[in-house]
Amino acid sequence: MLFFNGWRMFSLKNYLGSFTILFGIVIGGAVGALLGQQGIQWSMFGDVWHISSRSFAPIGQIFLNMMFVTIVPLVFFSITSAITKTAQTARLKRILWAGLWVFLVTAFVIAIISYFGFVWYQPLAGYDLNALLASHGQAINITEIPISEMLIKTLSAGDFLELFRRNNLLALIIFSLLLGSAVMMSGEKGQPLARFFESGMSVMLNLVKIIMYAAPIGLGCYFADIVGDLGPQIVGAYANVLVLYLILTLVAFFGLNTLYAWLAAGRLGVRVFWQNALTPALTAVATTSSAACIPVNLMAVQKMQVPSDIADTIIPLGANTHKDGSVMGGVFKILFLLTLVGIPFQSFGMFVAVILVAMVVGIVIGAIPSGGLTAEVFICTIFGVPVEYVGLILVISIIIDIPATLLNSTGNNVCAMLITRIVEGKHWLAHKSSAIMSK
């Protein structure tokens, strides 16, 4: 009873931020559609005044620029501080390795489903988006770049200072992982630096919070310019993306979770999982926050008989790094963007690139608080697309927020069952159930 009372009180509060941003985008889109590129003009104070959808472009770009400057320090402090706080024991290493493989495999599966779902549904079919290319310029075709050159540019930087440029995000992520590991290996001598990274992370989160207060106005103005440029057809394209995402969410939530629960513990695993799935699912929908679901998920996996050390490690870790909903969203953003700019993605090389980048978006960048814009910039830089497109695919993050959180959060519980299967053996749940019944 307490949970449902809290759910009613908590849901609107947690939706307020997303609803406010959506409201700003809707109003901006409506204004842009009404004004268009031609706009209106009137006389006042002896002067002729003119306003069009393009009049809002500077405000939208200023907001995006403010977000751009936070991305590099946010990535650096977030990943480095997370590594420096990692503890190590023999069983913990085994749990973490099992968790790594389970997270990677489940992310790979959802990425494959998302890719072929997008290709089959073709949410942008029938929309004339050539005007977007004319306003932003032609993107670089990744297939024309030699694979060796692409790897060098993607995984490394030629100078220390070049690491801190937003077009070198993956190189910065790798450097941050290595630096955090070095600090952790330094023991007590590395603690002052570890505290610096943790303090920097706290400051950056507050900075992003301050900037995001302007998100409804900034994104509303950006969208006014975009809709004025392209017309209302772009809104229909987003609606198609949302419909496809909801269809695949149902497939993943009911189909994949059932399959994984069966792999973890057979029919008994399926029954135990679904007996304890409702509360975590409602919490995810109500809060739209994977972190807010951690306490409820811990209680759920305890009822699923997952050992406490596995639950206490995997559930918090999964809330940050196992985000199947974000992987699906990453695939959608990439294919949406590539379709807009006319880059073909049906070749095997592009298929592999899309899957890998989407997994990085969901697993690595998904672990960065307020990392949504980081993901969009990362996608643009990897595929050689101008960062001016960030706002276009950022809208996808907003409209899929609720179903994405549902997949992100509830998937951690079934992954905890799979990891227990790897760590403790095939009949772990049957043994625990028998032990409970014999008491």
Image: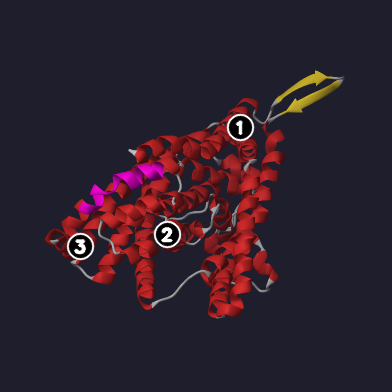
Q: Residue at x 30, y 44 (%)?
A: 278
Q: For the residue carrying disc 2, how many other residues have a C-alpha within 10 Å: few (<14), some (14-19), or many (20+)? A: some
Quarter of the image that includes the C terminus: bottom left
Q: Amino acid at mark 1?
A: Gly
Q: Which residues are magenta?
A: 272-285
* Disc number placed over residue 429 in the picture, else none: 3
* CA gap, disc 2 and disc 3: 22 Å
Q: Residue at x 43, y 38 (%)?
A: 240
* Disc number placed over residue 28 in the picture, else none: 1
Residue bearing mark 2:
316
Q: Amino acid at mark 3?
A: Leu
Task: Name the image quarter holding residue 101.
Answer: bottom left
Q: Is residue 334 left or right of residue 1?
A: right
User: Which SS class for mark 3?
Assistant: helix
Dominant secondary structure, magenta: helix
Q: For the residue carrying disc 1, how many other residues have a C-alpha within 10 Å: few (<14), some (14-19), or many (20+)? A: many
